[in-house]
Image (spheres, rainbow, N blue to C red):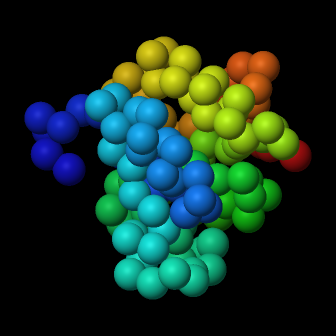
Amino acid sequence: MSKKDKKPVFVVDNDTQYSEFDKRYHKKAKFYSTTKLVGRSTAEDQEIFIKSSSEDIHIITRNCHHFIPQQIQHPTVKIGIVGIASTNVNESIKTFGKLLKQLPKHEDYRNKYISVSSKGFVITDRTTEIN
């Protein structure tokens, strides 16, 4: 990513949600599907995490419990994890727009775990223990 490109870059763990994020927020952030990131339609979460880390791409997922341990086990990795923590995904995606307004730069997501629901979002520094 060039220094000129300051908007956040994300990989969306669920390809079905990818199109909705990209459709709504493509002017404020860049989104990749997991298929585009790893080059095939099936990938293990650990592979997505490693590839995202090497490419400096933050992760949006509904499977937070698969990615948070990776984040804790790799303290030198700086990518952020955005967890969609609601059964109403469309409402959570709307809330994500508010998050983009509050955190408009790629660097704003580093070392963070962010839980997004239909009611709002909670930002936690990744060095804080998450149970």
Vertical side of 116 occupied by 95: above or below: above
- What residue appears at the point 24 percent right and 32 percent down from the top-left corner? 6
Instruction: Return the x and y of residue 79 as percentages of the image width and height.
Output: 47, 49
Vertical side of 60 occupied by 55: above or below: below
Q: Would residue 130 be seen by someone viewing this image from the given angle?
A: yes
- What residue appears at the point 57 percent right and 83 percent down from the top-left corner? 42
Instruction: Return the x and y of residue 22 as percentages of the image width and height.
Output: 42, 44
Q: Residue furthest right?
A: 131
Instruction: Return the x and y of residue 67 as percentages of the image width and height.
Output: 67, 60
Q: Would residue 29 be seen by someone viewing this image from the given angle?
A: no
Total marks shown come to 0
- What residue appears at the point 62 percent right and 80 percent down from the top-left corner? 44
In the image, is 122 to the left or to the right of 28?
right
Residue 87 placement: quadrant: top right
- What residue appears at the point 63 percent right and 72 percent down from the top-left corner? 45
Instruction: Return the x and y of residue 80 as percentages of the image width and height.
Output: 53, 45
Vertical side of 37 occupied by 1: above or below: above
Residue 69 placement: quadrant: bottom right
Vertical side of 44 occupied by 81: above or below: above
In this orientation, which residue lies closer to the viewer: 112 or 92? Answer: 92
In the image, is 116 to the left or to the right of 55?
right
